[in-house]
Structures are given as C-alpha cells and as structure tokens.
Amino acid sequence: MLKQEALKKKRLNKVGDFFMEYLVLMAIVALVIVTAIVEPRFLTANNFRNIMGQFGPLSFTALGMTFIILGGFIDLSLPGMISLIAMITLSLFDVIGEVPAMIFGMALGVFLGAFNGTLLVRVGATTQAKALFITFGMSQIYGAISQLITGGHPISRLFIEHPAPITQNLSSGTIGDIFGFSSFLDSIPITFIVFLFFLAILFIFQKKTVLGRSINYTGGNFLAAELGGIPTKRIMVMIYSICGFMVAIGAIAAFSRTPVAAPEIIGANYERDSIMAVVVGGTSLTGGRGNVLRTVLGVSLIILLSNCMNLMQINSHLQEVFRGAVLVTAIWLDHRRHANA
Amino acid sequence: MDKSDIILSINGINKSFPGVKALSDASMEVRKGTVHGVVGENGAGKSTLMKILSGIHTKDSGTIVFDGETIEHTTPIQSIRRGLSIIYQEFNLVNTLTVGENIFLGRFKEMKGLRNSHKEARKLLDSIGSTIDTHSLVSDLSAAEKQMVEITKALSFDSKLIIMDEPSSSLTADELKRLFVIIDDLRKKGVTMIYISHKLDEIFQLCDIVTVMRDGFIVDTKLINDLTRNDMIAMMIGREIENEWPERPRCAGETLMEVQNIRTRKLKDISFELKKGEILGFVGLVGAGRTEIVRAIYGADRAKDLKIMINDKLLKIRKPADGKRSGIGLLPEDRKLEGLVLSFSVKDNITMSSLNNIAKFGFVNTSLENDIADRQIKALSIKTPTPHTKTKTLSGGNQQKCIMGRWLELNPDILILDEPTRGIDVGTKYEIYLLMKEIVENGGSIIIISSELPEVLAMSNRVLTICEGRITGEFNPEETSAHDIMDAAIGGGD
C-alpha cells in the first residue's frame, strides 16, 4: 500500500519534472494557439517572415549571455559595449571599408569581453553579485567612451559613401536576394541564417569540447572546479570573450536594421532582454545547468510574446508589465527547480 | 551533593546528523559557581552539545534541566534570556556598531534609549575592570577586547551560565592572564562557566571540574584534583583499537618531493619532504594550519618563497591546475563545498579532472568518458543507481568515493587526503584505508590530514605534528606513543 503510494508519488513527480522541464515550450505552444484563435493574421506567411526577421540583435547577445550565466556569472555591460562597438564600426566604414570595419568590430568585442573577464579575475570577483556591479560600471564606461568618440551625435548610414552590401543584406535581405531559389526558402531572412550558424557552432562547442564542458563545472561549483584542476580563471576570461564576440555580432545586426544609429539608444535594454531570454529559456541563474538551445526557446518566447501582443494591439505599457511578469515567473520557477533538484 | 546546587543537568542527549552520530547518550551535571572544563578531540561532540544547549541545534532525545526548569525547545535568544550565554570562537558582534550598541543590541527600548544603554554598558564594563570606551567601534577592537565585550554582553542578560568556546585561541599570554582574572572574579560572584579548550594547561589552571568527551560520548566527569594530565590525554584518545585499520603498508623509498619555506600569514617556515610510496600524516588541531599547508603545495593558496621539488625538479605551482599537471591530487576538506558539483551526476564528477586526457583536438570522447565512470564506479564499488544519478543524493561515503575515483583515474604521484573519512561510516572508512594501501603499493605517495588521531597513527609511516602554523615534531608512529604525539600537536606540555 505504502509502496504503491510512493510509486504514484514518484510518477507524479516525473510528470511534474517533465512539465517543469518543457514549460517554455508549452508556453510557446499555448501562446501560438491562443493568438491564432484570437487573431487570424498571426498564422499568415507574412507574419512568419516577420517573426523570423525578429531573430535579430537580441538573439545573438542572448547566445553570448548564455555562456556567462552558465559559468555562474552575469554581464550588465552590454548596452555600453554595443554602443561602443556599433559606433566605432560604423565610423570605420568610410575609412577602411565595410568588411575590415566589421572584422575590427568583432575583434573589439572579443577584446572588451576579455577585458571584462580579466578585470573580474584581477579584482577577485568570483561571485555573480560582484560581477553584476563591476560589469554595470563597465557599461557606463564603454557607453561614455562611445559618446566621447561620436560627440554624442548619431551616425546615419545614409551618409556612408563606401558601399556596404553586407549591412544592406543583414538589414532586410532574404535568401532569395542572394541565391534566388524560387521557393518558400526565398523569404528566410539572412540574419536568421546567421543566427542558426552561430547557434550550431556554440551548441557543439558547449556540449562536446573540454572548454565548453568546463564552463558547466565552473558554474556548478566554482571552488570544486578550481580544486579539480579546471582553469576557472581562464574560463572566466573565455566566457566573457565569447559573450563579447556575440555582442559584436549583435551590435552589427543592430546598426544594420536602423538607418540612424544613436550612441545612447542603440544598446539600450539589451542586458535586460538577454538575461531574460536566457533565464526564461530555463538556464539556471545560479550557473551550471542549461544550454544555448534553451536560450533559443527563451528568445522565441519573447519574440512571439511581442508579436502576439502587437497583433492584439495591447497597450505598450501593459506589454512591459507582461514582460516583467514573465521574467519574474521564470526566476521563480528556476528557484523551485533548483530547490527540487 | 545537594540538588539545588546543580545549575545545569543534561541527561541522555542523542543527536544525529545525516551519516554521523554526533552525540550518544550524553549526560553531565554542572554545579553552580564553578568553572567546568570540557575537553576532547576535534569531532568529539563538544560543539554539538553546546549548540544544543544554546538552541542552534535541536536534540533528538534526552532532557535538559537548566536552573530548575526543564527545557524542551529553545532558540538562541530564549536561551540568552533564560540566562545561558555562549561566547563563540568567532565572535557574534556587529563590527560596524559601537561597543555599547553591541552590548544592548535589540534592547534599546528596554534600556530606554541609546544614552542609557551606553551608561549601563559602562557600568558593566567597569564591573569586570575593563576600560574600553563604549563609543568605540567594535571593528577597532583587538580580539581580547571583543571578548570583553562578549562577556559584558553575557553579563547584561544576568547570565547564570556562560559557555566559552575556545576563548584563548586568539589571545596573547598577557591577555589570557587578564581573562583568567575576570573568570575567577565572576566565579566568586556566583556565575557558572563552562570552559571549552584544547589547551590542557588552561584547564588545569582554571577549572574546578572537567568533563572529557570522545566520539560523541561523555567519557567521564571528574574533579580536576583527581586527574593528571596523562589521565586526561588517555581519556581523550583512548579508544579500543581492533582491526579498524588494515596492516600498515611499508613501501617508503627514495625522496619524491621536497617542500621548502611555505610562508603565509598563518604558516611559518614549513619545510618537509615526502618519500615515494610513503604515507605521511599531518597531526594537529583544526586551525593549526594543516589544510593551509597542503593547499599551498597544490597551488590553491599563494605562498611566497615556496619551493617545491619533485624528483629534484623545481616546479612552478601557481594554481590548482598546475598542481594537477605536476602529478599532485587533492581530496579537499569539505567534500560538498569544495569537492563535488552536487547537482551534477556521478559520471560528471568522476571525469571532471580527466577530460583533457580523453579529448582529441579539444573534443571530448564521450564513450571513453563513460568508460572512465564505469571503471571507477566498479573499482571503488560506488553505490549509485546509475552513473547519471546526481551526487547530492548519495551518502557521504559514496560522495567521497566519487572524488577518490576522480583522482585515481589520473593516477597522481602524490595524493593529498584532507579529512578523507570525516562523517563516513565505518565500513566505507575501511575501504578508503585499503585504497590508500593500494595506492602506495603501486608507487604513489600520500599525505593524510585527519582529526582522528588513531587513524593517522595507524596508517602513516611518518607523522608531522603541526601547531599554530609550525611543524613542532616528526615522529615514527610505531615507536612513539599517541600520547607524546598529541602532546606535541597541542603545543607541548612543558
């Protein structure tokens, strides 16, 4: 009798675990169904194209943030970094050409990320809380440098004389524009393909390589990883560098889709939205557990949520309320999962 | 003995923590107006007993009668209000507040304001002959002064019983003398004190009655005049030795590692050598610096001027990864905090340190990874449902085996075991001893740190005693008595 009850309880727990594990997926499905019923425009090809197009800057920065949070840290320097990288890269377009400028921008991203990581190691900030304040400070510094360089003036792509085909393609191009198949594939945005490319590389890196696996150990228990001979400090610098690189890609995607890039606006809120995408996706804020695929789910949920709310013409302030509620719920669920695990 | 003479009487207290029995049927009585010493090795149960009295831990069974009142459940604040105060080794003061504020913390209303609090604090401090300004910040005080503040705080609650846990550990000789005067004074005023210390000299100088604890049992309570120092040490360490350990391995050969000049804030000029195939034991009290020595060798702590030579080759070890690469392994003191990633699987915890060895171009070979896990689970007979079970669900002994397996897979030349059997059941302990034997028989060397003296003495080929950051002696445990080694570890009786 008792045993049966125990078994039943165990089975219930399993159902619960499954539910918890795939909660985001279910939320996405539920969202799609509800919106499709309420708003028929949702299920049109046009809207799907629109949604794919939304996998823009945020999806890149969120992939980068996944590694930071997986390693048990956090990075609030995104707004400043994006601003600095975007403005410098754009300024270089007319000086050294588009491709070299973009490569420089990516290198700058890696450098700024590595700088963040090294700074944390040097000051002995091996906890998330310390990383939070230090990277917050770094964001102010990067943002201010960006303002200094541009004199606070926005840069308009329309005034760039040098041809910039890649930027053009990233902003609105589709597969059809380049290869010209005449099929459904034609309408897939280039940014979405770039996103899938980085997703695949980062996924394999995290799951299969020694360094990728070491991030999980570092986030799971920093002290144990360190005493187990994992070079935790190098891992810290590495995850911030990866994040820096993805932030640079995000910055390029960000200035590609706006005709005028203003230093104080271009990076705004990316730290918040990236952390939200990662945590909503189910990567644990305490580190060690999660992966980039989860982040894709998180990003999808955020994009779909915006799309649905826009279609339903929900007041923008109310939209913020919902977004905040989703983040709080995600953190609460993460805490519960952690307590149960 | 008159019953009204007893201020505290405990009877048949039992307390278990997961995997360990911390107190077994502990009974003692404390007489009013005495200084009652409590001695015992680390892990004997002294602190657990005191924490039950103060309400931090809850007893599993047994009765406590304090000042004629039976106490079932209590919390720290209730205990203090009842008149039972504890002064811990690491003080319980708010550094950023003043002395007066600390003494009457949370009671400003009862005291009718801050000014009155300071006035009362002054009176109390005067009563124990202390001149500390009640307006100075606690962070500016010396350890001795903080202790005075703690004592004053206890007195401000009209404490009938004050428990002092290792009060002398941070005091200089002069400060200690003053503390003794104050304790003596309080005794004359009728305050009862329980004095916990490792330092037997202090016990003999100060206490009227002594209770000796060992392995969670109370061995005996005796008048100090009826005891000699030797009796007391015998009671502290004297457990029956009956096949608890395998036969001592004898494989020590040439010198393998030479350690020179470990100097840190805590360690003073530590130099020693380790032979190939040797089991070297470090004996000392908790806080003597044993763990700090091995951490420095492994690269977990930085130490200036440290020179490590293995096979006459000078090594640069700056971080644990260097230590690992140099053929050193460390099983850390606290397996949950520093050893395991508890939310990760048995497999992940075992393969953690060997991923580099099974990778090609940086990619981990997953099937080799599973092989490692299976091999170590089998070799160490780790009891786990599957290799993918989370380590947090395993028993302490099996958790420890996971970390052992992690290192055995790397087959290090030197394996450092810091408290390898703490909180582990007897059967698994024996398995770990056998493993140690196997390691040295295969040419490895071991440094073992343990607070269980008999364990170190039975397994080691050589023992170094460490006291207050210095090596105070080197012994062959087969030729020297446990008593003499213990004596050297607690700073020498002479």
Image: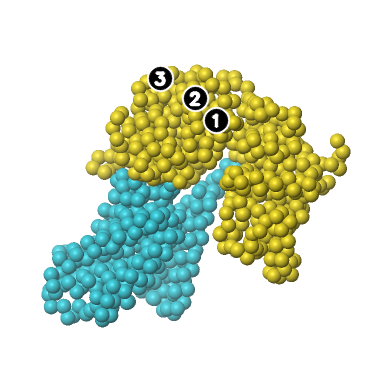
Chain colours: A cyan, B yellow
Q: What chain does mark 1 sit on?
A: B
Residue position for label 1? B488
Inspect this view and state whether residue B264 appears: yes
Image position, residue A220 (x, y; %) = 43, 49
Residue drawn where x is 61% and y is 51% of the image: B144
Element type where label 3 sits in the image: loop
Image position, residue A149 (x, y; %) = 24, 75
How many numbered marks are there? 3
Question: In the rendered view, does B5 fall on the left or right side of A312?
Answer: right
Residue drawn where x is 44% and y is 30% of the image: B447
Tag 1 and tag 3, C-beta contact below 8 Å: no
Element type where label 2 sits in the image: strand
Element type where label 1 sits in the image: helix
Task: Pick the residue in front: B385 or A137.
Answer: A137
Residue position for label 3? B251
Q: What chain does mark 2 sit on?
A: B
Question: With respect to residue A90, does A230 lie above or below?
Answer: above
Residue position for label 2? B475
Label located before the other in sequence (1 or 3) = 3
Tags 1 and 3 on a common chain:
yes
Q: Identify the amino acid type marked 2.
A: Phe
Label located before the other in sequence (2 or 1) = 2
Q: Quadrant of the C terminus of chain B?
A: top right
Q: Identify the amino acid type marked 3.
A: Cys
